[in-house]
Image (cartoon, rainbow, N blue to C red):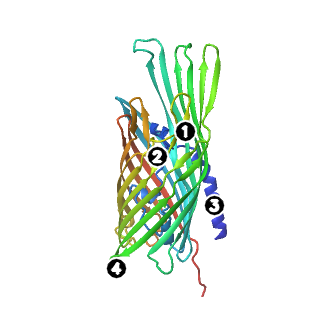
Amino acid sequence: MRKQTIMAVLLLAASAPAAWAQSGTNSPYSQFGLGTLADQTSGFNRGMNGVGLAFREHNQVNYINPASYSAIDSLSFIWDVGTSLQLTHFEEGGVKKNARNGNLEYVVAGLRLAKGFGLSFGLIPMTNVGYSYSNTDYVGSSSGTTTHTLTNSGSGGFHQVYVGLGWSPWFHRRFSLGANFSYVWGNYTRSVAETYSDSYINSVSRVYTADVQSWRLDLGAQYVIPLGKKNDVTLAFTYTPGHSLGGDPQMISTSTNSTEGTSTADTLGTGLKLNMPDMYGFGLTWNQGTRWHVGIDYSLQKWGKLEQPAYIGERQYVMTSGLYMDRKKINIGGEYVPNTMSRRFLNRVHYRLGASYATPYYKMNTTSGLIDGPKEYSVSGGFGIPLSNAYSNRSFLNISAQWVRSTTSLIKENTFRINLGLTFDERWFMKFKVE
């Protein structure tokens, strides 16, 4: 068992470079704030569009609420790897574009340490930055001869490596507490370049950078209320305290004289920092034995009181308020399993559906002033396919499809995403008797 644990940790470390090698997004909206917030859910949650705060699964790693680790089966070591493939359609002013990308989403593991104690560890994304686009117009009027091109690009993101514990006390097994302790790291580079076809007009570029090495703490609780022999309701609460991520954000402003071939660069920003907000989550799940699981989650992220580094003109890059807003999200979803012990394959499949709505956490600075970022509407459906015999549904292939629509008065995004999660559930701790 010790050798297998060591191998699991080594596999996680080997998977990490692939996980952060790609940004996982093509959205121009990832140029705002800390980037696009990652969907921090595993394969079985995604078929229900992220619902899971109050789910207590014995054969899945539900890391969005660490209190759930106390429900992990005593004989299991669970290893879960997830990927996604997506196609995004962008539309603005009659112009339409498509973009494709794929990403290794997460690598997590879980096991029971002792009665009432569960452990999980893994690698998950936190934010993504990835975009590239440009606009060209004429200086003065549409009949002018000098063109002005504005090019925007960015890449990077932040990631987490976590270790979590879940505990269900002996004096009250219906109640569970848990905590995830994470190391957060990553960086981003964003650039804005203005160039002119007339060499007598200076070209100007601004490059924004930050490099984060910090921590994160996620706390969770669950309480099970029996409603008869086969029915129960689980209540859940999660809390993530806000704190400074640091990151030393800076802006390098460069002016280039094409005629003389000279450049002047200034570095702006001293003592600035990136921040994370207080985050709250509330969940409720109704369970009917192993057949029905239906849940609803509500989350609140208190971004509105935070400041953000911003370029305000006149060569000033300073901490600025009013660019963030509180983010609210509601998810509803569930799964149905006809009969987990049936010999018929289709009766042992987990059928999942879900939907969600989320408000933005940032405001966008446009030529007409500050406007709210895009609201998100999404729906999903999926299957949990057992990869074992009729009586040992231990490992699963979780497949789901998700449609996400982001809407503002500017660019409209429609994303179709395929999520694949492979859960290996191995019996590591069974004791054998020889007669």
CB within 8 Å, label 3 to label 2: no
Q: Earlier in the sequence, mark 3 or mark 1?
A: 3
**Residue bearing the label numbered 3:** 9
The numbered disc on residue 229 is 4
Marked residue nearer the N-terminal end (4 or 2): 2
- Spatial separation of the CA atoms under disc 1 and disc 4: 53 Å
Q: Which amino acid, mark 2?
A: Leu
- Per the image, label 4 sits on a secondary structure element best described as loop
> Pointer 4 and pointer 3: residues touching (CB < 8 Å)?
no
- State the image coordinates of residue 397 (x, y, percent, origin top left): 46, 59
- The numbered disc on residue 155 is 1
Q: Are marks 1 and 2 in contact (CB under 8 Å)?
A: no
* Residue where numbered disc 2 is placed: 85
Of the numbered discs 1 and 4, the one sitting upstream in the chain is 1
Nearer the N terminus, badge 4 or badge 3?
A: 3
Figure quadrant of residue 107: bottom right
Give the amino acid at mark 3.
Val
Residue 60 visible (yes or no): no
